[in-house]
Amino acid sequence: MEDATSKGYGLMKKAYLLALVASLFCTTGAGKGEAKEVTLKEAIDFALSHSPLIQASKASLDVFEAKLKQIEWLDYPHSSVRFAVSPMPAQRVSSDNLPYTDMSTWGIFLFTEINGVLPLYTFGRISALKKAMKFGVEATKAKADVARQEVIFRIKKGFMALALASESLEVIKEGRDYLDKAKKHLESLEANEDPEFDPVEKMQLRVFDAQVLGRELEAQRGVAMAKNSIKVSMGVAIEEEIGFETKGLEPIETRKDITLESLVDMASANRAEIVALRTTILAKQAEVSAKKRAFFPTLSLFGGFRYGYSNVAERCYSPYSTLPLNTYSAYGGLVLEGDFEIGKKLGELDEAKASLREMKMQLSELESGVKLEVTKLFYEMQDAKKMVEAYKDAVEAARGWVIAKTDLYENDLCSMNDVVTALVQFFQTRMEYLKAVYDYNVAVYALERAVSESLSWEKE
């Protein structure tokens, strides 16, 4: 049954994925079919339904909800039925009304017993158990939100890494254009045997060309790794052919009301781990209450019915006969039930209290750790934003530097070394700018995950 369920889920997942991929195809004006790439929102929606991390959290929630159902049934009557059938020798009654066994004749014996117990008053033990389990379900839901936030963060970070690698390829293409322009001028000088031609400059170009190729291969590898990372976070096999739509790598516009104090307050109120632990503490407090009430007895209403029949038994009216043959009986009343396992119950109560103290200390440590994490991420976001602004100005300067040196070189007013130096600075500055934007955006995403709240006006 379990294997069939797993196979069924696998087929559903495959069908969903095929439907997603199929829905991404559209027809161009020329009549050719082109694949529409998966957007960030589509990837997140798919992941929230298919990511293994999400599925694991849902399974954990199902476990606690099943336990809650078990506790809720404690308020209902508990009944049992017993039915027995067996061969038996004939039971006769003598002339003086005494039973005896006749081994020469055999028949069957049927016996049925039905009984039930309905708890009337448990001194709040069942209510405390229900409360504990309900808090347990809520804590598990909060833990599931941790998985949800993690999956969203991974996919956003993957899309950002893909945008970084794609933008890097564009930068390399732009730099290569400048390089090709200088290379053509050098080749023209060599072909015309111009005295300005310098073989050393040709070797410099070859070295720089190899460096550009290395950067290009690195960027291409980054594109492939980013796509695979997104697929893994979505719960999709790496072998699946899926394209992803990325926007230009631009800094995220964050809300204007963000302060360190407000972020710490957000994290304290909304952070899934904190909410989960706080709810778990409430569940443990209810469990301690249930352990205390376990010392008291339970008042219940009980009742039952018995019936015995045999085709080879004569009914005996002697008060000395105890065989339930061809007779029936019913009973019922109130019962006060308890036990004297005081030592065991005291140990269980002490264990629950110790566990509660441990959780409270863990909560205090977690709150301090989250505050420290939010502070660190906030400063990292601020620093990253400053670096974005600084490198943005530097990129414009570096681009102007390259253009100026390339024009001067074409007019034999500077050396190839000047052009190469300008190109190197352009590459480095532009790459550093893209990396700064990536670091800033990821810092914003990480801070959103840390406080469990959106901090940007970004339209996804």
Image (tube, helix red, strand yellow):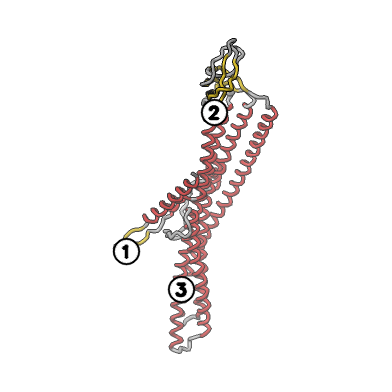
**Which residue position is annotated with label 2?**
74
In the rendered structure, the answer to whether residue 17 lies left or right of residue 367 reads: left
Which of these two is toward me, 459 or 66?
Answer: 66
How would you rate the neighbour count of disc 1 (Cα within 10 Å): few for under 14, some for 14-19, many for 20 or more?
few
User: For numbered disc 2, what is the local secondary structure?
Assistant: helix
Residue placed furthest toward the top: 96
Q: Earlier in the sequence, mark 3 or mark 2?
A: 2
Residue at (32% x, 60% y) in the render: 27
**Which residue position is annotated with label 3?**
176
Q: Amino acid at mark 2?
A: Leu
In this view, the mark in front (1 or 2): 2
Q: Amino acid at mark 3?
A: Arg
Query: What separation in Å lies between label 3 and label 2 (alpha carbons)?
Result: 75 Å
Q: Earlier in the sequence, mark 3 or mark 1?
A: 1
Which of these two is toward me, 318 or 133?
Answer: 318
Q: Amino acid at mark 1?
A: Lys
Residue 56 higher or lower than 126, as above or below: below
**Which residue position is annotated with label 1?**
32
Query: What separation in Å lies between label 3 and label 1 (alpha carbons)?
Result: 32 Å
Query: What separation in Å lies between label 1 and label 2 (alpha carbons)?
Result: 65 Å
Q: Earlier in the sequence, mark 1 or mark 2?
A: 1
Residue 355 in the image, given as x and y percentages of width and height: 65, 37
Q: Quadrant of residue 67?
A: top right
Residue 281 in the image, given as x and y percentages of width and height: 59, 36
